[in-house]
Image (cartoon, rainbow, N blue to C red):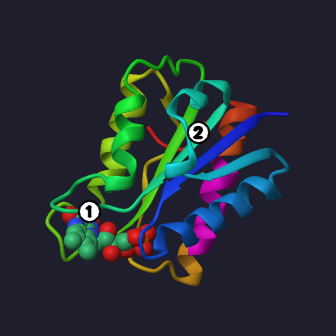
Amino acid sequence: MAKIILIYASMSGNTEEMADAIAAGVREAGEDLTVMEVTDANAADLAGYDGILLGAYTWGDGELPYEFLDFYDDMEDLDLSGTKAAVFGSCDSCYAQVGKAVDILVDRLRELGSEIVQDGLKVELTPSDLDKELCRAFGRNLVNSVVHGTTVQQ
Ligand SMILES: Cc1cc2nc3c(=O)[nH]c(=O)nc-3n(C[C@H](O)[C@H](O)[C@H](O)COP(=O)(O)O)c2cc1C
């Protein structure tokens, strides 16, 4: 069975709702999933997983949330080659850098050798029922990529 981990940060609950729906999609697809808030997670553990899902809201002027900063720094020397990954987060299009935290984490994972298997999923504020369906599909797609080698984007 593939090992998949989902790590997220959420201040007001929107990214957490996305995480719950994505986790449901992974579990529907029958795979083993570990879910953690980023403040409880160790970056070094990522290398022990086949599939990585990171979730972060965007803060400041297009920045990572403060909860993610230590984790992001600790990722620096990891070798994530052989892993498949995808990133998600709630955002707000009133800001100039919409969902930039998602892009920052995608870039970091790529630098470390992980294969990004689908475009980052950015949801405007609180996920709607349709957004949650997209989140479940996002989780299933990650599983398909890990188990069957499919890629949704590019
Ligand atoms: C001070 C502040 C700065 C923010 N900056 C951005 C930003 O640059 N880009 C963006 O897309 N959203 C920004 N947001 C919006 C949050 O990402 C958005 O409210 C999100 O839904 C919060 O997710 P959460 O409920 O998971 O904490 C900002 C929100 C606050 C309060």
Picture quadrant of ligand 1: bottom left
Image quarter (top left, top right, bottom left or bottom right) of the C terminus? top left
Decide whether residue 136 is among the magenta residues.
Answer: yes
| Kind of element beneath mark 1 | loop
Q: Please report the residue visible at 65 percent of the width from the left and 54 percent of the height from the top.
A: 139
Q: Nearer the viewer, residue 22 or 64?
A: 64
- Image spot of residue 114 (x, y percent): 50, 26
Q: Point out the stretch of residues depicted in magenta.
A: 132-141
114 vs 142: above or below: above
Going 42% across and 32% down the picture, which residue do you hit? Answer: 109
Query: Which residue is disc 2 drawn over?
Result: 52
* Whole-percent x, y for residue 105 in the image: 37, 42
Q: Quadrant of residue 61?
A: bottom left
Image height of 15 relative to 50, above or below:
below
Residue 59 has which mark?
1
Q: Residue at x 61, y 48 (%)?
A: 6
Q: Amino acid at mark 1?
A: Trp
Q: Horizontal placement of 80 versus 51: left or right?
A: left
User: Residue 16, relative to residue 84: is it above or below?
Assistant: below
- Is the residue indicated by label 1 positioned so its CB lies within 8 Å of ligand 1? yes
Q: Residues within 10 Å of mark 1 (few under 14, many from 20)?
A: some
Magenta portion: prevailing SS class: helix
Q: How many marks?
A: 2
Residue at x-position 30% and y-position 52%:
64
Q: Nearer the viewer, residue 119 or 86?
A: 86
> For residue 130, what is the image quadrant?
bottom right
For disc 2, does the CB lie below 8 Å from ligand 1? no
